[in-house]
Structures are given as C-alpha cells and as structure tokens.
Image (spheres, rainbow, N blue to C red):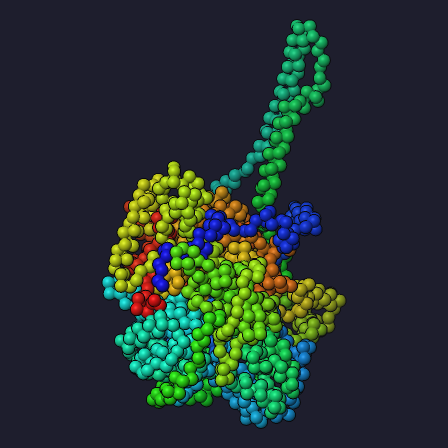
Amino acid sequence: MILKHCRISFFGLMLMLSQTVIAQPSADVGKTLFRNYCAQCHAKDMKTAGTGPALGGTEDRWSDYPREDLYGWIRNSQAMIGAGHPRAVELWEEWKPTVMTPWPNLTDEDIESILVYINQEYTKVPEAATASSGETGEIVEANYNWLYWILLAALGALALILMNYISGLNKLIAAKDNVDYVEKPILKRIFSKPVVSLLILAAVIFGGYTTVTNAISLGRQQGYEPDQPINFSHAIHAGENGIDCQYCHDGARRSKHAVIPATNTCMNCHSAIKNGSNFGTAELTKIYASVGYDPQNNQYIENYDNLSTEEIEAIYRKWITDQYLADNDLMDLDKKGAKEVNIQWEGIVTSLTNKQKKQIQGPIEWVRIHNLPDHVYFNHAQHVVAGGVECQTCHGKVEEMDVVAQHAPLSMGWCINCHRQTEVDFKGNDYYANYELYHEQLATGEKEKITVEDIGGLECQKCHY
Amino acid sequence: MKQEFGDIWVGEKDLNRDESFIANAQNEIQNPSLVDNLGNPEVVEDLGGNRRDFLKMLGFGVSAATAAAGCDIPLKRAIPYVIKPEEIVPGVATYYASTYVSGGDSCPILVKTREGRPIKIEGNDLSSITHGGTSARVQASVLSLYDVNRLKNPSINGEAATWDQLDKDVISALNSAKGIRVVSQSILSPTAKAVINDLKVKYTNVDLVQYDAVSSAAMLSANEITFGDRAIPNYRFDKADLIVSFNADFLGTWISPVEYSIHYTKNRVVKDVHHPKISKHVQVESQMSMTGSNADNRILVKPSQQGEAIAYLYSAISGTRSVASSIDAAVKKALSNLAVELKKNAGKSLIVSSSNNLSEQILVNAMNQALSNYGATISFDNASLQRQGNEQGLVSLVNDIKKGTVDVVIFNNCNPVFEYGMTDLAEVISGLNASVALSYDINDTAALCSHVAPIHHFLESWGDVEAKRGEVSLIQPTISPLFDTRQGEESMMVWLGKASNSDQPYYDYLKKNWESSLFANQSKYLSFSTFWDQVLGDGIYSYSAPGLGQDFSADIVDALSKVSKGEDSDALEVQFFEPLTIGNGEHANNPWLQEMPDPVTRCAWGNYLTVPVGFDGVKKFKGFNNLSDGDLAKLIIGDKEYVLPVVQQFGQAPGTVAVALGYGRSKIGDAGKNVGVSVNDSIRLSGGLAQYYATGAQLSNKIGKEQWFSSVQYHHTMGVTADNKKGEEINADEAALAPGYGNIFAGYQGSLVGRSIIRKAHIDNLEQAVEDLQNEREHHQGLNAETLYPYDAYRKEKYEVGHHWGLHVDLNACTGCGACTIACMAENNIPVVGKKQVARHQEMAWLRIDRYYYGDVENPNVVYQPMMCQHCDNAPCENVCPVNATNHSSEGLNQMTYNRCIGTRYCANNCPYKVRRFNWLDYTTADLFPANQVDVNGESVPFGADNLTRMVLNPDVTVRSRGVIEKCSFCVQKIQEGKLTAKVEGRQLRDGDIKSACQMACPTGGITFGDTNMKEGEFHDKLESPLNMIVLEEINVRSSVTYTMKVNNRDEVLELS
C-alpha cells in the first residue's frame, strides 16, 4: 500500500462539516445526517424495510440496554456482534449477511439528532389532502395565429388592389399624354426590380442569421438523452429511494469532476439488492459481470480478470436462470425462460463490450452527456461547496429522470447569465473578509448584494486558462 | 586593465552597436522572412507547403463542412473505475514523497500525480539537504519517464528477448565467470549496495567499480589521505564570509549544487540596507562558469595554471617561499592580496576546488586547515556520499579484461564508454564472455553489450538514497511500470536466485534491510510498520553521523612539488566543463533540458565554443581570431579535430576557450542524437585521473556559419540603445516607433534613453545607491503625473478590493540556475520547438532568464534577471488587441484567452518586456498538415505527437494550438486552486497559500508570489524593501513584478591590474 504524502487534505473539510453540527439534537440536522449516511439502506418513511431494517421505533427496541450500546451499534455493528451483545446478535441473525456500514465519525449528538428525525418521521400523520379544488383556475393558452394569417391575406389583397389602381392611373396618364400604354403582365409587375432586390436582401439576412445561429449551436446538445449501457434509473435511486446525489457522485464536493461512481460504489448496496425493481436481474447482473461478483455465493470471484468469456457466461447464465426459476416457481427452464436468459446475457455482452473493449470484465463505459469544450475549466467543488448551488440548478430534476438528459444548454451565455444573477454568500464565508470596500458598501446600503460578477466572475481567466 | 563601459550589456553586438542587431531589436517578431528566403531551397522545403497539401486542405475543408453540417453528436465515453483506489479522487492531485536520483546526484522530491500519472516534481521541504529546492534536471526528470525512446523490453545481442532467456544466459555466464565486475556511477543506495554484496558472496571474484560522470576522485583521495575519510565534507557556504573557488561550479554542477546554492545565497541577500553585509566570492577560473558569473571577483587563470595558482595561494597563506611558477604577475598580486583577505577571515572562509589532481586537492585541504575552516565552515559530520567514484577502477578494469581475469561485466545504468572513452573500454567489451547492461535507454555502452536488461524509471521504482551519512530518503513508485522493464536491483536479485515470488521482491528486500539496519538502530518507533509508514510518508529519515574526528596530516612539500605544471606558452588552452543542463550526456535525451539555454552563453541545442572577446581599449570588440557569434571554427587538440560553432564570451581568459562535455552522442534516443559535438575523447588521464582541460590547442579562423545558431542571447531584448542619424543616442526599439525623434517627439516619455532595467550597486555605496534609486523612482512616477487615466483613482476602486497578485524577484538570490524555467515548462504545457525554431527566435518559454554584464568589460560582473509577463495594470498589450483576447482581471492579472485570439500579434509587438510568445507552428500536433508541424530533432514522430509524451501534460492547463499568443499567466490554475481551497474551508487566503511554479522550484527563495493587498507575511515584507525597483517604471505600465537591486562585493585589491 502506497502511503500518500497528501497536501490537499480533505480532513479539513470533514472537520468543518462536523463543526456545523450543533450540540443540541435537532430534527433538521438529523435529516441531513440521515440523508448522507442512512438513506442508502434505510427507507425514509421509517416503516418499510430496505437493504436494512425500518428504523421507526429503534429507541424502543434498544430500550433494554444503555444508550451507549445503541451508539456503539451505529458506529461499528460488527464489533458489537463480535462482542456478543444480545440485541446485536439478534439483529445479525435476522439480517446477515448484510453488514451495516460502520460510521465511527458520528458523534453522540449526531446520533441523537438522527433519532429525533426518525421519531418525527415515524410518528408523522400523513398530511390530508386539504388543498381546495376548482379555484386554482387553469389558464387556457389561446392561440391567435389565425389572426396573423387573416391580416397577411388582407395586406396581400390591399397590395393587389393598389397595384391595379396604380396601373389604372398610369393608363389614364398615358391616355392623357397620348402615349400607347402597354400593360405589363401581372407577374412582371409583382416581381419588379425593387421587389426582387428586397427579396434577395431578405434572403441574405435570413440565411446569414440562420447560419450564424446554427454555427453557434454546433456542438451544443441541450436535451441530449443517449441510451446508456445500463438502464440505470435516477428516478428510482435519487427519487424514490432518496439517495443523496453526492453519495455516488462524491467528487462533486472535493474535485472539479463530479465523478461517475466506480462499480464498487454500486456494490455497497447491490451486494444485497440483487433484483432490480424495474428490470430484475437484467441490468444488475451487468454490474456483477463488470466487477466480478458472484451473487449466488455472495463473494467476489478470484482471478476474475483472467477468466474467459465462456467461463463468465456460465457463471451469470446460471445466476439469471436460477433467479428466473425461483421467481416463476419452476424446476426447469421453459421456452420463454430460455429466451429471457439469452436476451439478458446478450444484453450484458453488448453493454460491457465494444470495438475497443473486447473483455466483459472491466469498467462500464457510460455515454458522456455533459460535454464542456476542452478550453473551459469547470469545477464542481467550486459550485457545490463554495457556491452552494443545488445540483438541480444545472442538471434539472434528475431525480425524476429514468434516462438522464442534458437540462441546460451549457453555453457560455448561460454560464455568464447565472454569474450575473447569483448572489455570493458574502457574509457567511470568511474567505471574502478581505473585500473590505464591498463590506462597507453593503453596510451603507450602497450595494444591495454582491454577485459573482462583482468578484470577477465574468473575467476570461476564471474559466479559460 | 579595468574599463567600465556602458551600463549593462547583453553581449558584444550590443556594445558594438551592431546594425543588424539594432534593426532586429526594432521588431518584436523576428522570423527570417519566408518571402525573403523563397530563393533558398532549404527554407522552401522546410515550409513543406506543396500542391498536395493544398489539395488536402481543400478536400478537408469541403468534407469538414459537409460533415459538420450533417453529423450526429460524437459519442463520448465516460469511463469510471471498477474499484476506485482510496487515495485517488479524479481531478485532484495526489502527492507522493520520493527521491530523484541520477548517479551521484539526488534530490528528495514530492511527485504530483493526477489520475495515477506523475506530471510534476516539487522539492521535499522536509529534506535537510535541499530544503524543498530543486534543479532544472530534477524538474525535467518527469519527462524522461515518458521518453518514447526508452528501452521497452530485454534484448540479447540486439534481438528482442524474454526475461527468462536473458536470466538463463546471465546466470550461466555468472556461474562460469572467472571474474565479475559491476560498473556503476556512485551508488547512493545502501540497499542496492547490499544486493551487490550478496552478489559478492554468491559468486567468486566479484567487485564493484564506481566512477562519476565527472570525476571528483582526487578530492576523495585527498580527504582520505589528510583526514582518513574517503568522503566529501559538508561545505557551509552560508557560514563563510569569503569564498574562494578554484574552477568549482558549485552553484551549477559541482557535487551538491542545490544545497550549496541555498547556503550561498543566504549570505548574498541584503537583509538590512543600513548595515549591509554579504559574503565575498572569488572565483579563480578561465571560462565564465555559472558560479563564476555570480562571483564578485574573478581571477582569470588558464586551466593548466590552476595547480600553480593553488600552490601560490598556499604559499602566500602559509608564508612559505613560493615555488617558481608560470602564472602572470597580475594574478600573483591578486592571489597575494587574496591570501591577506583570507587570513583576515580565518575560520570564516572557505576554499573549494574542482581540480582532479591529488596534490592540488591536498593543498586546498591544507589551506582550509591553515585558515581553521575545519569545524567552522567545513565539517565531516554527516559527510556527503554524493561522489564515491574513482576512474582508476575503470583503468584497471580494462587491464583485467585484457588479461582475461575479468570476463563478465554488469553495467549498472551507466555509460562509461562515452564518459571515459579514453580508457579503451569500448574495444574490450566485445572480448567479454557476457556484458550485461542494466539500462534505461540506449547508450554507447549498452549498444556494445551482449545482454540489455531494461530498468524502471526512478518514478516506477522502489529504493533508498543516502546522499549524506545519516540523511536517508526513500524512493517509491508513483506509477506502475509502463513497459516490460525490471528494476536493476531486482534483476540482480533474480541472478542471485534471491528474488522471492512476490510481486515486488526488491520492495520486500528493501523493507527487510531497513528493518535490520535503520529501524534496529533507533528507539523512537516501537514497531517497524509505524516507522516505515512515517518514513514513507515523509520521504526522509535522518540520524546523526559524526565524522571520524581524525586530525589533518599531509606531506605538503611533496604535494607542492606535484601540482600540475602550468604551460606558459601562448598556445591555446581548452577548458571542458559539465553543462548545467544535460550533465555529461546523461540527460541529453531530455528535450526540455536540450532547449534550456545555458545560463551564461545562453545557447541551446548543442555545445558552443566560447572564445574571449578582444577589446581595442576604445570602443570596439572583436572575437578571438575575428570569430563572431555563430561562426564555425575548427578546434584542433592533438590529433583530434572538432568543428564547433562559436560564441563570444565576456570574461573568458585570453588564450583560452571552453566547450561543454556531454554533447554529440550518437547512440541515444531521437531528441539527443548528434546534437552538438562530442569532445569527451579529448579528456586525458593523468595518474589515472581524468583532466578536464587540454593544452596546446589550435583554433582556425572562420570556416563557415552555423546554419541554425540557436542562441537566445539577442532574442527578446529590451532597452537596446543605438545612435540615430544625427549621432544622438536613442532607444533602438523607439527608432522604429518615433521616426521624428529629435524633432516633434523630442522628450516624450517613451523615448527615454536610460531605461531602468537593472539597478546595481556596490555594497559599500549601498545607502547612496538606495537614495538614488528612490529619487529616480520618484522622478519616473512624476513623469506620468499628467494622464487621462489616473491610476491611483481607479486602483482603490478596482484593485484594492479582493486580491491583487504580484511577484517579487530578488536578483541577489538568483544564481541563474534555470530550475524555474523548466518548472514553468512542466506546469504550463509549454511546447518544445527544436533547434531551428530557436534559431528563428521562436522559443516558447514563458519565463526567460536574461543575463546582463556590467562593470569592467574585460572582466565583467553578471546579473541574472528572470523575466516573465509583468502583468501590468496599465498594459500596452491589452489596448491593441482587436478582439479583446487579452484583457485585465480585477485581480490584476493580464489574462490571455487563447480561444479568442486570432493571432494578429499586435500585443507582442507592443509589449515593452518582450514576454509574449506566438505559436508559429503546430508544436502540439493537433493539426493534420505536416507543413504546420515541427520536428524537434528529426524524429520519426514529432515531439509531443505521441500519446506517451502527452501523459506529462498538466490537465488543468489548455494545450495551445497554432496561431495564438501565449505568455506567463502567474500560474492562474494554481491561484484558482488556492482560492477554492480557502473558500471551501471558509477561511481567508493566507500568505504562501499560493505559490507559482517558478517559486516552488527555486532553491534559493529568489521568487515570491503573493497578494499585494495582503498586509502581512513574507511577500508583504519583501515588497517593503528599499532595494526594490520596477523594470521600465518610467513608461508607466504599472507592472506587478518587483525586482531588487543587485548588490555586489567586488574588491579592488583583487583586480587583475
């Protein structure tokens, strides 16, 4: 194991996080802590079991033992099981082989706060549907396009009438001057020189405008919604299960990259949850095939990197088959089942291999959705931690997306607009203390707020270097 | 004769008012015009444009437009880890402590890695030797990891082979050997030595032959004779008030330059203007070495007379009658005066010499002893092991091979065939039963060996380094081996049959060795694992290792009679020296080091013969034999002839020339192949010791012109003066701008002649000089009182809010070593352009070190000035950009936005400091057209075009394309990173949080980066110094870089008059 001589330590960050926790247990703090630490395995209604048991009534179940035992259990359950604590052993018998992740960093106050939050959620009466109906008044958007068409037709008719009138007048003048008047055909009269030049000018302007707007939008891909190798649903993970974005995208708070989670992050939960709610074994088995986990025996496969495709196929076909049989209460694979197993195995192969990557083993190659140009420097930590921007501000309601699509245009204008409007947490962060002039101006009311623009957020070398 | 002439000057052309040079100085862009050269087939061919390229471009244009119009979004992949290593956060750098090592040179370092790739090297400030300092070679070593020419698999007789075959062959050869020798440069690793000892136990007649690329054997032997310790003592240049160096380039290449530079500059920086005190440095040499250029006084002595000069000084100190000697009366007088000064400074002086003559080194020790310097400025406690070699071993090795008593030789990553060609080693290798080269890349020695076992780069290796007794540092791998290579020590363990089956047998061996030696001898740590983890984290372990305490004893009379006899003939003498950049050829395949100009001659990509500049006593200067810069001349030494390009060198002793070793290697990777001329075969042995000079040489007149004369001496010069048609002195670059000078433009401030570029003073007149400086600055600031843009009014509104970045450069701390320039290349993805482009003034370095001479034209002093973008608050470059690609930030940065730049180069033309660089060609090979690409040294694949070399790129800095201007950004990526860290931690930024790459590399603390709005801290204190000046302050550009006045301690009694 290589020891790092790490300069950029995030212990400071951890320290800071823990300092923000107030000594008094509070449901608000508990809620944050619950979301960060517990929600991945425990349902947030506190009544149903997830990967781990429902947490409602925890305190009652531990009431026979000193409070410290409950703390100890949360901080390191395996140690208590090892020590033979009766309640711990009882829980282990019920839930093994699922191991509760130890949280040694939680303080007593933290745990108390979580317990307060658990109780609050557990005892909460579902809110009655009290919203009065009918009065909201849906606004029907009227469509007035037809008016424009009528107006256009009227103008056209007017032009024709005027043309006719002018030609009549010309005829009169000709007659008066005793000159032969040859009436031009109507088409020639419509497409006279001035009209044609006007039309060409309009075409050039329109063409130029279209070219420029299209050229600007080249490479922009707002709304881009590609198929991914795994039908991973953010709606289920972030929405239904309420897993915090940064549990998986843990780079967002400490790096420029939000980070696509490594497969071992998936395994934190999916070593226990082996059947997905949408696709059963079809999608989850891809994770196991990527990392080399044998879901049947709950262990990682030795020497997985050197297995042949056939050996891998045997392992996962058996797993899919067995699951199919168990789900359908069958002893032998029926025709439909055989087809299903084939489809699922083919799915694994197509998802995990491509032209460059011939092996099943190895990383899952996701399709990148948010592509900033190479000459743009963007830092997630800057926005998420220092700026306190919600993920959804730029990424949209990902927790409602089954397939992720690009929400924002990611254009420079869009960045700049936000920098113009966004207020900086000027008083809350000691970093800004040396902007003395601005503090004075805030105090005297000369400035209402300090935006990102005021501290140089529109300057070139904030993003381009 | 002492002749003060002019203020400062860059070279002979400057003093001579060379017309073409002055004409060139008027143009920022000095590209030999392509149109002018269209008659020259070479230039046209070099252009590469032809009908084919035109058709290609046309076809590409049409198809690209079609494709762009109709294509889908290209599919980009985002590939995560399968199992993410705990210590890696993608996008965040991880640092590992390790140690740079190359032969006897070493430096404890921190390796910056991104996503598992080492990309930058910083010094380890826990080291008591280097204190976080680095050198150019250390900075550049990360590039050699990604050398496309490194050996990638084992080979037998030139054919690729497997490790099994090679091991089988070698083991059977070792088993049947009559005598085995391991040849190596000084081995600093105690554990590697243990492996070699195992070899001695297992096989019969095994011996280790150590040598150094440039020998210090006489010095080691002298220490053994006089003090009973074959080691190099600790020299404390910081404790010495008077330093005398006989040709020892201790700031550049001699023994431990980083350490010596730190100590030396401590006592050269002026701390208190009212009671100034700096040390005095006297250099006795023939050629202007980097160390000599920093000296206060130089006593010019021919190379062959060094011995007699040492003997003369000894006699003068000890009061004994001096022996007859060939040296000049003027030198004798200076040396006598020096002896008086030395005796005044007894116990506070230090004499060093690079002589490789045993008697001379004994005399140097005797002088230091007589001056009671041992125990004061010199100590054998924690003595240095950085040089252990003795080339006499190589001589006897050749004899043993000829006799047949040695039939197997293992070369441990060394190249004695090139470095010690005179030993006939090349001829005898083929007579061996087996010759095994443990080699990193192909070299003259490995090419002759029957078996080549490629080794890891030090960044892929485990190991330890004991540069000084009791100062041990660890080497740990920072990347998995890139190719099928094996660590040298592991190979030897395999041949011993000792390699265990574990993944890293040498790692296990290393740990065991540490457990049984260093861990066993300490009491602080109870368990080995905590001890190991701590040392691995720190990278350093030290303990006290007192010297032997033996008293001085030597046969002085014998030594005095055996110093080398000086030649008093008029024949030319040649000094060979180790270049600061590529060493004695070891680093010749590193393009960064090849492109780094020599600090003194300022020439890159090759070795140049430095010839003395003759002075007619009035105004004109002529090179020796009428040679001028870039001429080719033939140098004849004995029966050998060399055709070398010439540079005129101020301060070169009359009757001598000098040329660098290490160049002209032919068995080497692409970058270094046949660059320069090898003069290594003219080194001769005297008493088995290498002598780095030649006498009785002849130099021809001009026989030709070097086609690509890549000296940056006259590139990007500022403040050059010239005579206008009326004979008035004007600024050369102003002549173009103000043709009516003398009439309507007379007196407008831009036309000032005496531009303030360098300020210098003698320490005795410092107070007066400071006062003058203050007055002059006041005057300069007053020049701009009437302006439409009152700076002070908007300064408060704009720049005093938040941060305002600045840089402080202490010219007294700058030795010119150039570590900062390479650090800047590495940090900012600066391309290498190759010899031709350098010759065309197109080098890309953002940070250059200008070298100016001043004082006596025949024996001048030198001042180095690191010059980078000055980030002017009133920047002339910003106003002229038609697309606003360069503009000013509220933090005082002059920002360059590449993707907005359209390449008009108006900014470069308008920059008074000449620091903007234009990408003339596609140096990073992002282009499709060979005409736009550049080959650095005729490689098959242009430098930087392959994915291996690109691994060294810093992912936080844009790689620039052809056609845009670039320049120093004050390491804006580091500024942003430092600010973000502070914001995330919710605290104010502290002084020293952000350090520019040049600052971090600088061993002597000469460069300090900081926030000028910060009211305390090191940077603030430095800005308060009364020695501070701003370059070209009179033109009111409001530069953010502050320099100090250069202070010297030149002593009149030591003048050669």
* Residue A367 percent location from the top left of the image: 61, 59
Is B319 placed left or right of B515 in the picture?
A: left
| Quarter assignment of residue A400 | bottom right
- For the C terminus of chain B, the quadrant is bottom left
**Above or below B27: residue A313:** below
In this orientation, which residue lies closer to the viewer: B326 or B272? Answer: B326
- For the N terminus of chain B, the quadrant is bottom left
Residue at 52% x, 57% y is: B843
Most extreme residue toward the right is A335
In this orientation, which residue lies closer to the viewer: B583 or B3? Answer: B3
Most extreme residue toward the left is B274
Is B31 placed left or right of B537 in the picture?
A: right
* Residue B374 percent location from the top left of the image: 33, 82
* Residue B607 percent location from the top left of the image: 52, 66
In this orientation, which residue lies closer to the viewer: A82 or B548? Answer: B548
In this orientation, which residue lies closer to the viewer: B742 or B881? Answer: B742
Residue A308 visible within the image: yes
* Residue B1027 percent location from the top left of the image: 30, 59
Residue A460 visible within the image: no
Residue at 34% x, 89% y is: B551
Residue at 38% x, 80% y is: B324
Residue at 56% x, 35% y is: A142
**Above or below B397: residue B594:** above
**Above or below B312: residue B515:** below
Q: How many marks?
A: 0
